[in-house]
Image (spheres, grey):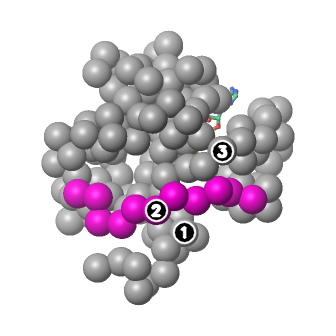
Amino acid sequence: MERTLSIIKPDAVKRNLIGHINQLIEKNNLKIIASKTHKLSKNEAESFYGVHKERPFFNSLVAFMTSGSVQVQVLEGENAIVSYREIMGATNPEDADEGTIRKLFAESIEANSVHGSDSSENASIEIAFFFSGLELI
Ligand code: ATP
Ligand code: MG
C-alpha cells in the first residue's frame, strides 16, 4: 500500500468536476482517505511548486493555482504514485492518452485539472504540506 497527494486544480473545481475526477480515481482502485477544500495563498503556491522557480511559466502557474479553490486529497492503493500519474495522463493534455483525467478535462498545459506526486519522497513531503497526522487514518 502506498499514498500519494492529489490536487484537483482551480480549473476543474470551477467547472464542478470534483465528482467526475473522484469517480475515475475510485474506479481505478485508489481510495480517497482524506479530502479538503483549500484556497492556496501566493506563498503556499510558490513553496509547493518551488522546484519550478526558475521556469518561465512559474509566475503564471502560481497565479493560476491561487485563482480559485483546490481540492487536496490523499489517495491510497497499490502503487498509488505511479498508478495516479497514469490515471492523470501527460502534463500537456494534447499528449495525454484517451480516458485519462487530463485528456478528458484539462483546458491547457497549465490548466491541466490535477496534480499528483511524482515520487515516494515527494508524496511524503506533499502530504505533510497539507495534512496533519490527526487528519490521516
Ligand atoms: P504536477 O506537478 O502539477 O502534477 P506534472 O508533474 O505533470 O504536473 P510539472 O512539470 O511538474 O508537471 O509541472 C507542474 C505544473 O506546471 C503542470 O502540471 C502545469 O500546471 C504547469 N506547467 C508545466 N509546464 C508548463 C508549461 N510549459 N507552460 C505552462 N504551465 C506549465
Ligand atoms: Mg510535477
Please give left or right for residue 121 compared with residue 75 in the image: right
Q: Which mark is residue 36?
A: 2
Element type at marker 1?
helix
Cα separation between marks 3 and 1: 17 Å
Query: Tag on residue 20?
Result: none
| Quadrant in which the C terminus is drawn | bottom left
Q: Residue tagged by mark 1?
A: 130
Residue 51 colored magenta?
no
Q: Is 17 or 24 nearer to us in this picture?
A: 17
Chain part drawn in magenta: 31-41
Type of amino acid under label 3: Gly
Q: Relative to residue 27, is residue 90 depicted above or below?
A: above
Which residue shows up at 79% across the image and 48% down it? 53
**Which residue sits at x=72%, y=47%?**
66
Quote the CA–CA distance across marks 2 and 1.
9 Å
| Residue 85, image quadrant | top left
Looking at the picture, how far across and down is residue 84, in whole percent?
33, 44
Specify the quadrant that holds the N terminus.
Answer: bottom left
Q: Nearer the viewer, mark 2 or mark 1?
A: 2
Asked whether the beta carbons under mark 2 and mark 1 sit within 8 Å of each other, the answer is: yes
Q: Is residue 1 above or below residue 18?
A: below
Mark 2 or mark 3: whose residue is earlier in sequence: 2
The earlier-in-sequence mark between 3 and 1 is: 3
32 within the magenta span: yes
Q: At label 2, which amino acid type do we have?
A: Lys
Q: Which mark is residue 68?
A: 3
